[in-house]
Image (cartoon, helix red, strand yellow):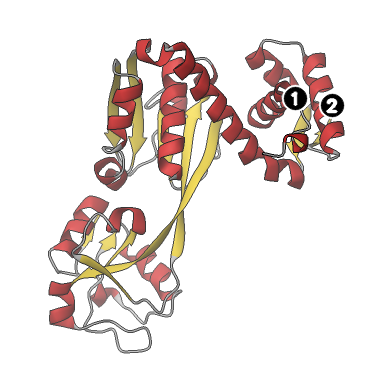
Amino acid sequence: MNWNSISFDWNQARSFLAVAEERSLSAAAIVLGVTQPTITRQIAALEKDLEVILFERSGRSVSLTPIGLNLLDHVRMMADGASMMSLSASGQSQTIEGLVRISATDVTAAYVLPPMLDQLKAVAPHLEIDILADNQLSDLLVREADIAIRHVRPEQPNLIAKLVCEDPTRFYAVAKYTEIYGLPKLDEDHSQHQFVSFGDVEGMLGHLQTFGLQLTKRNFRYVSRSQVVEWEIARQGHGIAIMTDRIATKFPEFEPVLTEIEPFTIPTWLVAHRELHTSRRIRLVFDLLTNFLSQ
């Protein structure tokens, strides 16, 4: 560890994170329980120590500079670590109880979240978790959920969002399918192949055509608005499905196909209401999800 490279104060970094997430100096001062001049001094001191400009200021509003944006995820990781350290050292996590609602797509709820529950039980055995499996975006502002796992960045200004991972995603099929229909190739005729569509066929068709696949509606005999159902249809050998490596590797019967096409990525965002700053149980689950999904 190069200790001389750490040239700033944690309180300054904490103020930076609060301003970035709350999008104003006054709001950051409220959530941290300090005065606005204190926040201003700490931000100025951090900028001086790092020799960078972190925010552009316009009247009462602030926005991150490109350098500030690059530093934001690093400071968030520091905050997550500090939060977990405090809870673990004090034993407080063992006493946290109550209900936390997590909203996620059905495939994430079924195949990604359950392994995390062992970690949660070890850290906070008295917490209750309600997993809302829904492919529609839940409305956190009216408390449909406390935390949402989404694959698009939220647009509402009053929500806190963190990009936790970007999962490689490919085309997958089982041996039963390829034995019947053959192994698909990018530069060959695809008229005999079937792709399982998640949701709107027109949208799926347009998306896949961007990869150079010459497809029509006849290639989409099976459609479902449930990605779990889509995956099961493909697992039964009825078509090719798109899935993240994180989930596909849990099913050894699947093999990547159309490997000439470079894997693309699907982002995962953790989203929470501002209550994240004041609720220990929501903060704990949010931090555990961050660590779990980042692996």
In the image, is residue 54 above or below residue 286?
Answer: below
The residue lying toward the viewer, choosing from 254 and 232, is: 254
Quadrant of residue 64 in the image? top right
In the image, is residue 221 above or below residue 38?
Answer: below
Which residue extends farthest bottom? 188
Q: How far from the left and from the top, in percent, is residue 277?
A: 54, 19
Q: How far from the left and from the top, in percent, is residue 156?
A: 55, 34
Q: Secondary structure at mark 1?
A: loop
Q: Are marks 2 and 1 in contact (CB under 8 Å)?
A: yes
In the picture, the quarter occupied by the C terminus is: top left
The residue lying toward the viewer, choosing from 87 and 264, is: 87
In the picture, the quarter occupied by the N terminus is: top right
Quadrant of residue 35 in the image? top right
The residue lying toward the viewer, choosing from 186 and 122, is: 122
- Whichever of labels 2 and 1 marks the residue nearer the N terminus, that label is 1
Quadrant of residue 44 in the image? top right
Residue at image x 30%, y 38%? 113
The residue singled out by tag 1 in the image is: 9
Q: Secondary structure at mark 2?
A: helix
Q: How far from the left and from the top, in percent, is residue 279?
A: 47, 15
**Label disc, if present, on residue 45 of the rendered structure:** 2
**What kind of residue is marked 1?**
Asp
**What kind of residue is marked 2?**
Ala
Residue at image x 12%, y 64%? 236
Residue at image x 45%, y 72%? 262
Specify few, some or many for label 1: CA neighbours under 10 Å numbering under 14, 14-19, or 20 or more: few
Of circles 2 and 1, the one toward us is 1
Q: How far from the left and from the top, in percent, is residue 91?
A: 42, 12
